[in-house]
Image (tube, helix red, strand yellow):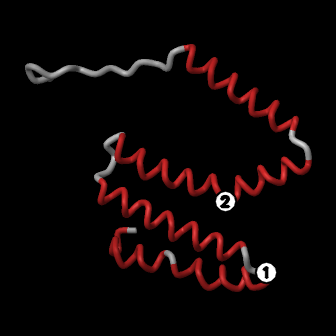
Amino acid sequence: MIAAGTVAWERTPAPGAFWIVLIAGAVALLVLYAMLSFERFEIFKQLLASFFPLALLILAVLGSIVFGLATPTEAAAIGSLGGFALAAVYALVARPRPERARLLKIWLPLWPSPARRYYGSCC
């Protein structure tokens, strides 16, 4: 039952133009990727490894605020956790393979411990 003065929202499918633009953009990216020379491809790989994760983190923080999913304080927590995760991944990737394997053997079992302490015995 809907209270008086409220609007019942109904879900509508995405318009056809959205799918056309999405497919055209994907095709354009594939064409651009096919045209890359080796030097440009290396630059693109460097951008993919350094700039895009940070841009994604920024978009996640600001998007959670804009779309009303989180308050600025909660978004800051998302950003700090994401920054910590990015720093950990960058530090791990920079290490030689044997040392990386040794660190993963130490780090991975430690992650469930805070979750168990926080959530109790339910998980």
- Amino acid type, callout 1: Pro
- Residue 53 image point, x, y percent: 60, 56
Residue 122's image quarter? Answer: bottom left
Is residue 82 placed above or below 40 in the rendered structure? below
Depth check: give the residue in front, 51 or 15.
51
Is residue 31 placed above or below 59 in the rendered structure? above
The quadrant in which the C terminus is found is: bottom left
Q: Is residue 100 left or right of residue 83?
A: right
- Residue 55 image point, x, y percent: 56, 51
Q: Is residue 26 left or right of residue 35?
A: left
- Residue 39 image point, x, y percent: 89, 51
- Residue 103 image point, x, y percent: 66, 83
Q: CA distance from mark 1 to mark 2?
A: 19 Å
The quadrant in which the N terminus is found is: top left
Residue at the disc numbered 2: 50
Residue displayed at 66% across by 79% down: 104
Secondary element under disc 2, as helix, strand or loop, is helix
Nearer-N-terminus badge (1/2): 2
Depth check: give the residue in front, 76 or 85.
76
Is residue 30 placed above or below 49 in the rendered structure? above
Residue displayed at 77% across by 54% down: 45
Residue at the disc numbered 1: 96
Is residue 26 placed above or below 82 in the rendered structure? above
Q: Is residue 15 left or right of residue 69?
A: right
- Amino acid type, callout 2: Ser
